[in-house]
Image (cartoon, grey):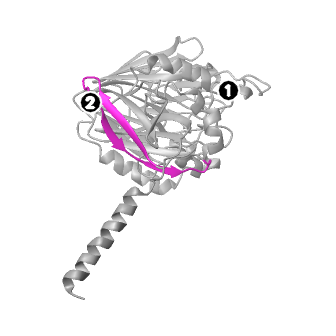
Amino acid sequence: MTRSLVFNLFLITTAAWLCAYCSSPKKELSQATLLRSPYLQCAFKDSLTILWRTDSGEVCHVEYRSADQEKWQQATGITRATNTAAIENEVVLHHLLPNKKYEYKIFTNKQEQLPDEKFWFRSPLTKKDTAFTFFAVGDIGEPVDEGGTPDVLAKALEPHKDSLAFGLLLGDIVYPDGSSQRYDQNLFQYFTKVFPYVPTYALLGNHDWQLPDDFTKEWKLPNNEHYYSFDYGKTHFIGLDSKIGDFYDYEEQVEWFKNDLQKRAKDTEWTIVFLHHNGKSCTYKQDYENVIALYPIFEEAKVDLVLNGHAHTYERLNPMNGQGEPISQYIGKTATYANPSGFISITVGSGGKLRGIGSDPKPFTPDPEHCRHPNLVAKANHLWAYLQLSIEGRKLKAKAISTEKGDVVDEFIIEK
């Protein structure tokens, strides 16, 4: 057999195989049903992550465009199994223009999910645009049938979603044990008008620490997902994992914390630390020594605010020094702080569960006048509330807002 004949036979065989392959029926993608509405994570620099869950799915993508664009852009993502028999869809958007409002659509197996909804988000700021507003709140996922109010919190946040850059969730996200099986029932079902529009950054509380692996499967967070930091405008945010008060990998985490503070950009104007447990407090919770041990670091690094949950109430402390002592010049002056020294610590564990409301036999109310720490408390109240913070250059405005009535129950300003 000649070489040319062999070659011709090869061509004929290859053509026949290709013809058979092309004519064979292609696998059809299954119809996917949405189980969890989209939620936004990791809004950093020019990128943002969108996640949602379906009952099945092999491929996913997002179509998106800014308000001044006609053509839709497309970004493909990945699908993966979860520990609740659902499929997680994840798409990361890159090269976003700064401080722009984008609309987006989500697709699983090439089918649009919730086509009647108009989803949108606002891309992160640059350092030139330093005015933004965010919220902080903890202890939100108490079941409604047990007296919890995640539904009330969600309704309170919804009218403000257009002005909120992101939110900080200060631990104890889902009661009683942070189980993945409870996330949709106790949390996500109530926030379908908030989480698809406002990115959130969560951290573990003591209840989440009963099933810590479930927590990391529900959220996409920086670093090791236990402790991390990020910049927004000229503000540096640091989230810590205080576990059940003893801290996750305490020595290693504290060393990371110190190094992170040293690596802050030179033009950083504000530093905000958030974690679950309180240090000193006049609430019904004990003082947590591992948090108090960080006070000298807070003072030396010029941390401005420390935000925590854990105590199911609201409590703002007077500015403290590194020894945890209220700075005398600020005692009784709770409205405006001009070039303050020290740091201000605030408990916002009033997002969905109040101590003394529901099953507890005796109601708890703050009593700062009879506190074990004299002159520690600037303002306290026992209402369902979240904290709204606005940074406008070198001015920070904070308001604690009642989730039931929408009125302001505490406010203060820091000016540098």
Q: Which residues are magenta?
A: 59-85
Residue 378 is situated, as x and y percent measured from the top left of the image, at 51, 21
- Please name whichever residue, 167 or 63, is drawn nearer the observer in this view of the structure: 63
Q: Quadrant of the C terminus?
A: top left
Q: Is residue 409 visible to the viewer in this orientation of the structure?
A: yes
Q: Residue furthest bottom?
A: 1
Q: Nearer the viewer, residue 36 or 294?
A: 36
Marks 1 and 2, how far apart at CA:
44 Å
Question: In this orientation, which residue lies closer to the viewer: 301 or 327?
Answer: 301
* 359 sits to left or right of 349: right
Q: Nearer the viewer, mark 1 or mark 2?
A: 2
Residue at the image position 28 percent from the left and 38 percent from the top: 46
The residue at which mark 1 appears reads as 148
Q: Which residue is mark 2?
A: 71
- Neighbours of disc 2 within 10 Å: few (<14), some (14-19), many (20+): few
Based on the picture, tell me whether residue 175 belongs to the magenta stretch: no
